Image (cartoon, grey):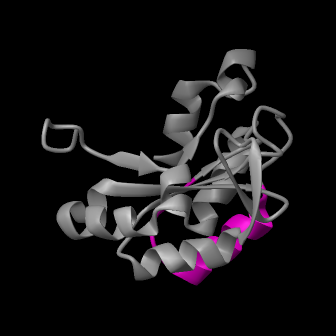
Amino acid sequence: MLKAGIERIILGTAAVEAPELVEEACRSYSDRIIVGVDAREGHIAIHGWQQQTGLEAIKFAKSMVRLGVRRFIYTDISRDGTLTEPDFTTIFELVNTIKLPIIAAGGISSLGQLKVLKQLGVEAAIVGKALYTGDINLKQALATIS
């Protein structure tokens, strides 16, 4: 797909189950590979969030950096779609530990939270349900964080 012009590929379960694939993909495509760090209570979940692993999210991300990964999507799956708030503590730890671009997802429900994520050094945020409910206005969000 990357040869066909797709800009980036996100690997989730495959990154956990086949780290050699991640390493090979990063050698060939460098920063076009993103790894999804989908965590519940600090541990990685795979197979559509249905299977919990014993892998700690931060340790997993660090292992992916060693394989060449240069960008991550961090999703707190216990907060996804809840309109509560992001797991700022883990996001802060992740940003400061790996010092690479992080896209945050899970629980984002206000412009204020987007501002905090920006202050923490997050590259981008995935906002879903808050757009549908009107809790976040897309034009205002883009103006606020630009």
| Residue 89 sits in quarter | bottom right
Drawn side of residue 28 relative to residue 26, left or right: left
Q: Is residue 128 above or below residue 86?
A: above
Secondary structure of the magenta portion, mostly? helix
Identity of the residue drawn at 50% across and 37% down: 143
Identity of the residue drawn at 73% across and 41% down: 108
Identity of the residue drawn at 62% across and 35% down: 127
Asked whether residue 93 is drawn in magenta, I would say: yes
Identity of the residue drawn at 57% across and 30% down: 140
- Give the quarter of the figure containing the N terminus: top left
Query: From where the camera sits, is residue 12 visible?
Result: no
Drawn side of residue 104 relative to residue 129, left or right: left
| Residue 122 sits in quarter | bottom right
Drawn side of residue 103 relative to residue 88, left or right: left
Q: Is residue 86 above or below residue 95?
A: above
Query: From where the camera sits, is residue 32 visible?
Result: yes
Residue 18 place in picture, x, y as percent: 46, 62
Residue 38 place in picture, x, y as percent: 66, 53
Q: Which contiguous range is marked in magenta?
A: 87-103
Asked whether residue 32 is drawn in magenta, I would say: no
Closest to the observer, 137 or 18: 18
Residue 98 place in picture, x, y as percent: 53, 79
Q: Is residue 42 above or below residue 52?
A: below
> What is the count of numbered marks?
0
Residue 48 place in picture, x, y as percent: 65, 38
| Residue 42 sits in quarter | bottom right
Q: Is residue 110 above or below residue 115?
A: above
Closest to the observer, 83 or 47: 47
